[in-house]
Structure formats: C-alpha cells, structure tokens
Image: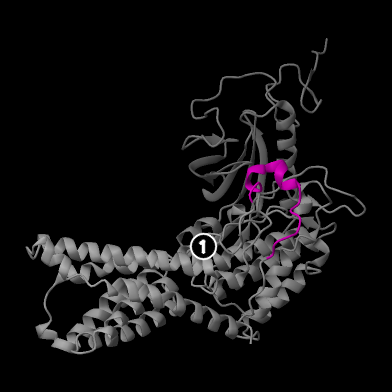
Amino acid sequence: MMPASTICPICSTSNQAHAAFCRACGYALQQPMAPSVFNTGTGQLLPSSLLKQRYRVLSPIGQGGMGAVYEAEDTQLGNRKVALKEMRQSGLSPQEIKDAADAFRQEALLLAGLQNPHLPNIYDHFSEFGRWYLVMSFIHGETLEAYLGKAGGGRLPLEEALQVGIQLCTVLGYLHTQQPPIIFRDLKPANIMHTADGHIYLIDFGIARLFKPGQARDTSTYGSMGYAAPEQYGKAQTTPQSDIFSLGVVLHQLLTGYHPSSSPFRFPALAVTGQVFPVELVALVEQMHNLDDTNRPVSILVVKQKLQRIAAGSAPAKATPLPPTIPSKVPQVVSLQTPQLMKKPASVVAVKPVGIWSIGRRQVAAMVIGIVLTGIGDYLTDLPNIPVVSVLAFLIPLFFATKFGPWVGVATALIGIFIGDSIAFGFANVEPSWFYYMSLVPFGLLAGLALSKTRGRNPSRGAIGFATMMSFIALLVYELITLIVAIIVLHESLSFAFSNLQPWYIVIPLILLPLLLFISGKIEDRRANP
C-alpha cells in the first residue's frame, strides 16, 4: 500500500509522506533537529557551516530587509569564493514566507538569464533546513552606501559621481531593453557594490519585476523610502521611468550628501547646497526626480548620453540656481508608510546640510585670501593712531568662518593674526602668548558652525541673523577666554583685566558683518543669474 502524501500548507504541493521539507518551496513540513552549526535566526549561520555538502560559510557580510549575505567558498570548485544569500523568514507568517520564497526564486531566475559586467553571476539556488539560499559571484568591494560613509561630507567629487551614474545607466539600460523589460525598483546605494577600481555592480533583485504592457498598476507595493518613485506605492505600474526617478535621487545624494529619507519627494536644489555644478547636470537631475513620470527623461539612454556629455566637459562651467523642487501636493502614499515624516514638511533651503568640516579647493582659496586680509588688518591694528582699523582683525575671520566653514575660520584667525603680529613686531619679538592664539581657535570654530544652516548662502534675513548670532557667541567666548587667562595665567586683578577688554571688538564687527554677508550673497546671486 502506497503511503499517504503530505500536502504543503504554503504552496499546496504534494510531498512524500515523511518529507521534512516541501520540495517546491522549502517549507518545514516537520521540525527536524538542526545541526549544531545552524542557528534559528536569519543571518546567524556559524563559520564553517556546510550547506548542500558543498558551500562552506566563512563570515557574514551583511543583512537587509530581504535576507542575509555571507562570504563562502565552493568546496567542489577549488574553494572558489562565492556570496551566499539567505532568505529572511524569521517572524513571517506562512503566507509571507511563501511571498518571500517567490521573490527569492524570481531573483534567481531573473539573474540566471542575464549576462552583464555590472551584474553578479548566479551559480546555484537551493533550500536546506527550511531556508532558501542563493549562490552568486563574490564581489570584492563594499556597498556604495559604505563607500559614501567614508567620503568627505557623504558625497563624491563631480567626476566620480558622473562615472558612477554612467555605469548605472549602462546596467539599467541593459535591464530595460530585455524582453519584457526588467524594472529594478530598488535602486539605492545599499544595493550598489563599489570595487576598489571604481567598478559598479547592481545587486539585490528581490523586488525587481517584469514590465507588463497594459497593466494599470503593480500588484504589490515595494520600495525604499526616499528612493522609490511615487508610482511604486500602488498608484500606477512601475516603468523604466521609475528607475530613472531613483537614479536621479541617487545622483542627487552622490553630489550633495543629502539623504533622501530625510524628506521623501522633496529635494534641496543643487544650487542651494553651496556647490557649483554644470547647468545641464542641474536641469537633468531635477527632471529625473520629477514626481510626474511623463516629465522625466524618455529613456535611460538619454540620461546616459547627457551624463557622458557633461563628463566630457561640454557643459558650461557654472550652474544657474534652480528653485527647489517642492510639489504643490505630496502624494498621499507617503503617509501610508511613514506618516510622521510628512506631518511637518521640511523647508528645502533650511535642510541641515552636510560636509561643513570638509576642505576643498574653494575652502583652501578662501583660507589663503582670509589669512592675507586678516594679517593686513592685524598689522594695521598694531600701528599707532589707527585703532578703529583693529576691528578688521576680527571682522574678516568672522566673515570667512560663516561663509566657508569652521576650518577656514580657525586658519584665518589663528594664522592671519599671528602673521600680522610677526610683521608688526618681527617674528623673533612676537610675544609667545600661546593662550591668546589658542583663544582664537574656538572663535573661528563657533562662527564657522553657522555654515550648518546657511551653507554660505547669506542674502536672506534668517541666514544673516543666524550667522550674526553665532559670531556674537564666538566673540563672547573669545573675550571670556582672554579674561580667564589674564586672571589665572597673567595674575592680573579682576578690575585690571576688565579694563583691558575691548568692547568695540564685539560691537563694530557685529554691525558690519550682516552688511558684508548681505552684499556677498547678492554678488553670488548676480553671478549665478547674469
């Protein structure tokens, strides 16, 4: 008599009576004792675990929403390095496990039929001990997210960002020209691998889908908040324009360091970040993350051609500032996922920028000019009969600190005043008042923190007011340190120390600084809008 079969409660597949796992979806029909090298949670395979009597786990690489990835070796092919991806199923219901298994199989099937230098190769797909695994080529590198974390300000130089964008266009163009087209749907730095030589790989096809002509909308809503296009939230079917939207967001992040999850669908204009970009690039990025997919570039090929033209240097050197992309109506779908993000829309201009501590060519040039001007101002301060000019020694460092950042402020004040004193008294005769010069360090740093809100863009009242407030605090700290040192180090009396304070060092710079910031802001606007 034939033994009765066991029906899988997940996929309804008929299995042998005493089968431990479903032969179709891998669901645990019974609960066998797992080997000691296994753990029950996703991402917790122990080193030296051997799967399928072939793949030996070496170490975990990382985890995501869809599963965990390990570095492993194929013992049947000369211990070749492979990446072993494990499907997440902890805490999932039977139906959710089935959906996850379907997505996992889809990723394997999609990648198995693709060959592109920017895609990993798929070697194997199997289930063991109730879990699904995917074996693919091991990429020696790190995610673009990790790479950005090490970059100054979380952003890349223009040339490097353009090369990353061009490579992404290449692989997305390959996917979009398949029959039927493949829509990646989850383009973000965490799903992009970056090697030491700058080569880019697209990974994690867990929510990629085939485009279906005539279909009104996607059957499932997936996407990473901030990177996913509005249509990915159930309003319409995703198309190649959805990937173009995500690529535009990624490019924006590579160029500015601004993380899109801070205000989904709202991006500070590239010009607001205080950097200079080619006109064509500014217009292209704005067009790519347009909320209306019909207003985006018609294909990824068009995007690639424009990026290549910009990279070749055919675009003008300076950008025309464009207004921030602020939609009149934010799609309601955002509130379905994270309503708290959209209750109070963030001001695009006031978004906290990144990279105020970085030093680039613009900051270095400003530092040199500031040191020279401060040195001249301090030299004039030390001459008799010109006491009013002494404010230049503080006004100039304050201006350069609030305009270009903390490091510029510190160098301008510290080096500039030291040089001015050396010229006035002779280098050998400069009084070794280390405490005086050290008091200039917090002076420059505090004023420079104004850049955290203004990004050096100072034509508005709010920006000028904030920069002036930070400068006032910097001057007070300077005077306080000077007073403390005079009493403790120089052993001066309290009354004598107070009598040596120079209040016009605070008053006059704070009167002139707002005017200087306003004028410089207007000059920048005029240059950007000739």
Nearer to the camera, 119 or 310:
310
Q: Is residue 453 left or right of residue 478?
A: right
Q: Main secondary structure of the magenta part?
A: loop
- Which residue is at 41% across, 76% downward? 513
Membership of 70 in magenta stretch? no
The answer to whether one can see residue 338 in this image is no
Q: How is the image coloured?
A: one colour
Q: Which element carries disc 1, helix, strand or loop?
A: loop
Relative image position of residue 188 (x, y in whole percent): 63, 56
Q: Is residue 92 left or right of residue 462?
A: right
* Placement of 34 over or under 67, stated as above or below: above
Q: Is residue 183 left or right of residue 197?
A: right
* Placement of 367 over or under 12, stated as above or below: below
- Which residue is at 19% across, 85% downward? 382
Q: Amino acid at mark 1?
A: Pro
The quadrant of the image that shows the C terminus is: bottom right
Relative image position of residue 370 (x, y in whole percent): 35, 82
* Placement of 459 over or under 54, stated as above or below: below
Membership of 327 in magenta stretch? yes
The quadrant of the image that shows the N terminus is: top right
Magenta residues, start to end: 325-344
Nearer to the camera, 176 or 267:
267
- Which residue is at 58% across, 80% downward? 525
Question: Residue beneath label 1, please?
Answer: 353
